[in-house]
Image (cartoon, helix red, strand yellow):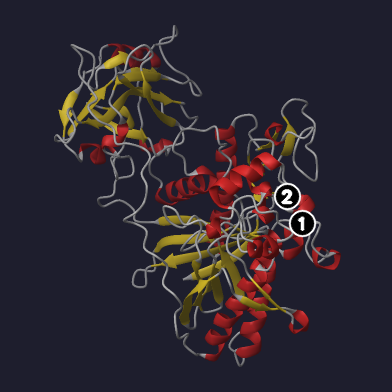
């Protein structure tokens, strides 16, 4: 394994800058930015062949380039970065050198015009797997993972937050526009195109990762070690400076939580920084569960909107028992945290743990020890703001579940693990086990049942074939599309397969060129207007890297007629079209 770090300064901004300013001035003065810009990369190589087999990067920016209005399945900017990195490494998929044609445009147009849609045809359960561009059988096993860090207050919408009615910057303290938080929206670098913003932020992380990956020459050596423990975070005794003892609280959310953020505003008139709850929402809250007097006092200055730690029907509304973990590979120490630490919270945790390791490690740890926050790991317990940020009760503070001393509790308990690791002691006991709720989960979305196509039509037949432009061919940047009769795609998620493929004609064979794992190909399903029949729309934004040639769409899907019957699989192909 090899290791390298570097700065990426254009992929995140602080979305709660007024709360950050609550932190001590001298502490803030130690850092050039109100977000962490450091990316950490761990490079994996095969021990025998020394060939690269993967990499992990940790970098703090939210996966919220896609807004709450997006209805398409997306890995957001982290998923985009992973796709770009793996394609770069393997030189597969959308690499334009994969396909070649010597035909001029007239020949391509004539070829395409002679190839018509096939109509729906039956196929096997795993047929779509053979049409994946990045096949899993014998292809590259390289994994490029883009992990989170202390991301709590970091937004990928780097242009800032603006009022959608006036175009002016939002209110600094509340991120609202004349008291309306729904008008305050963060803008990504591709504004107003959120898909473009997702791609840009993904590309920035990918490009930095490539730089670190190709520069990673320092091999990690030394011990491999870990510590892991479960903690009941609702009543941890915490010793603060001056030997003052405080406790964490049962989980609760404040009104600032309901206000949302500039990445996705809330509703119902709540604002970030609210310290009061009106009588109507108090009645709603008390109908669900009136917070105990202990809870109200414990959570101050957070006003309790939802006392989730005291709500247990049909099961607990918030986790009480959460895991914390330290992993060590030589000089690299990873802190696995079960939530979203804000920028300053993460800095405090890293520094405290590093100092504990150095103090107790008998020379085994030093200033070269690199500590990284691995965010949102093992379980999820919302946000962790500093005690100072907690006072303003913006979204992150209002979502800090266990009260104003949550961060102090994490630092205390991680230091216990760090001291154990530094001194070579094991942690006994491992703490209380969390409840297994897998058998009692509520499912509010019913399974699809009984789809059928219109009379005289098969699934996979065309509703609307590709509409050829007057020029006879599509250009780079154009968006050819086709619509197939298709049942609900949830009958089978086609894991390791694909719903949508763009095929290219190579000689006499059709070769998959793009699939629904590519940024340029969109698969959308809806119900036909005026009927109950399902439709699958495939749209391809022709990339600049696409080769000139003859292409067509292919769609895969599955259906059941009556409830409980055997799943039937189908495929359908559009007419061909030329790209020049």
Q: Is residue 455 visible?
A: yes
Secondary structure beneath disc 1?
helix
Q: Nearer the viewer, residue 438 or 297?
A: 297
**Figure label count:** 2
Q: Quadrant of the C terminus?
A: top left
Q: Is residue 84 left or right of residue 4?
A: left
Q: Nearer the viewer, residue 275 or 4?
A: 275
Image coordinates of residue 216 in percent, x first then y, are: 54, 66
In space, the residues marked 2 and 1 are separated at their CA atoms by 7 Å
Q: Is residue 445 left or right of residue 138?
A: right
Q: Please say whether residue 11 is visible from this viewpoint.
A: no
Q: Out of 366 and 469, give the one closest to the viewer.
A: 366
Between 194 and 287, which is closer to the camera in this rendering? Answer: 287
**Where in the figure is residue 482, as x and y percent of width and height?**
36, 19
Q: Is residue 94 left or right of residue 333?
A: left
Q: Are marks 2 and 1 in contact (CB under 8 Å)?
A: yes
511 up-or-down from 276: above or below? above
Q: Which mark is residue 16?
A: 2
Q: Quadrant of residue 186?
A: top right
| Residue at 14% in and 34% down | 565
Crowd band around label 1 with a 10 angstrom C-alpha radius: few (<14), some (14–19), many (20+): many
Task: Indicate whether 301 appears above or below 206.
Answer: below
Q: Residue at x 33, y 40 (%)?
A: 133
Q: Which residue is disc 1 drawn over?
A: 20
Q: Position of residue 507 (x, y in %)?
A: 25, 27
């Amino acid at each position: 394994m090899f290791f390298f770090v570097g700065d990426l300064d254009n992929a995140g901004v602080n979305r709660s800058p007024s709360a950050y300013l609550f932190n001590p001035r001298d502490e803030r003065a130690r850092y050039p930015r109100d977000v962490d810009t450091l990316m950490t990369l761990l490079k994996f190589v095969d021990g025998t062949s020394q060939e690269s087999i993967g990499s992990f990067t940790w970098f703090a920016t939210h996966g919220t380039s896609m807004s709450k209005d997006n209805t398409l399945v997306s890995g957001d900017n982290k998923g985009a970065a992973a796709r770009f990195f793996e394609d770069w490494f393997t030189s597969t998929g959308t690499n334009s050198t994969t396909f070649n044609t010597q035909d001029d445009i007239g020949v391509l147009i004539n070829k395409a015009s002679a190839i018509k849609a096939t109509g729906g045809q039956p196929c096997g359960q795993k047929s779509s797997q053979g049409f994946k561009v990045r096949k899993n059988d014998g292809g590259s096993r390289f994994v490029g993972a883009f992990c989170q860090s202390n991301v709590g207050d970091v937004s990928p919408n780097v242009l800032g937050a603006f009022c959608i009615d006036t175009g002016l910057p939002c209110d600094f303290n509340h991120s609202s526009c004349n008291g309306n938080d729904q008008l305050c929206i963060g803008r990504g670098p591709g504004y107003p195109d959120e898909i473009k913003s997702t791609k840009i932020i993904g590309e920035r992380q990918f490009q930095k990762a490539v730089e670190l990956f190709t520069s990673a020459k320092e091999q990690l050596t030394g011990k491999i070690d870990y510590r892991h423990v479960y903690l009941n975070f609702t009543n941890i005794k915490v010793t603060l400076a001056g030997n003052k003892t405080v406790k964490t609280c049962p989980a609760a959310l404040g009104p600032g939580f309901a206000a949302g953020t500039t990445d996705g505003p809330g509703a119902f008139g709540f604002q970030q920084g609210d310290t009061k709850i009106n009588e109507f929402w108090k009645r709603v809250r008390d109908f669900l569960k009136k917070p105990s007097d202990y809870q109200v006092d414990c959570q101050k200055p957070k006003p309790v909107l939802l006392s989730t730690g005291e709500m247990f029907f049909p099961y607990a509304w918030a986790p009480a028992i959460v895991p914390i973990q330290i992993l060590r590979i030589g000089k690299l120490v990873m802190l696995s945290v079960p939530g979203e630490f804000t920028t300053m919270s993460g800095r405090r945790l890293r520094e405290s743990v590093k100092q504990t390791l150095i103090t107790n490690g008998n020379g085994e740890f030093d200033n070269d020890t690199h500590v990284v926050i691995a965010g949102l790991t093992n379980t999820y317990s919302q946000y962790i703001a500093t005690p100072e940020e907690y006072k303003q009760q913006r979204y992150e503070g209002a979502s800090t579940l266990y009260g104003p001393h949550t961060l102090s509790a994490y630092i205390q308990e991680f230091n216990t693990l760090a001291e154990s690791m530094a001194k070579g002691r094991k942690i006994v006991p491992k703490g209380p086990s969390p409840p297994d709720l897998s058998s009692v989960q509520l499912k509010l979305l019913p399974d699809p049942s009984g789809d059928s196509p219109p009379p005289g039509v098969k699934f996979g037949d065309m509703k609307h074939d590709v509409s050829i432009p007057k020029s006879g061919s599509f250009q780079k940047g154009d968006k050819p599309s086709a619509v197939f009769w298709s049942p609900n795609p949830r009958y089978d998620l086609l894991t390791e397969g694909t719903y949508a493929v763009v095929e290219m004609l190579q000689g006499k064979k059709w070769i998959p060129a793009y699939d629904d794992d590519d940024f340029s190909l969109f698969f959308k399903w809806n119900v036909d207007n005026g009927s109950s029949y399902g439709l699958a729309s495939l749209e391809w934004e022709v990339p600049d890297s696409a080769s000139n040639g003859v292409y067509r769409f292919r769609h895969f899907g599955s259906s059941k007629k009556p409830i409980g019957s055997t799943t039937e699989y189908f495929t359908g192909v559009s007419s061909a079209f030329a790209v020049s």
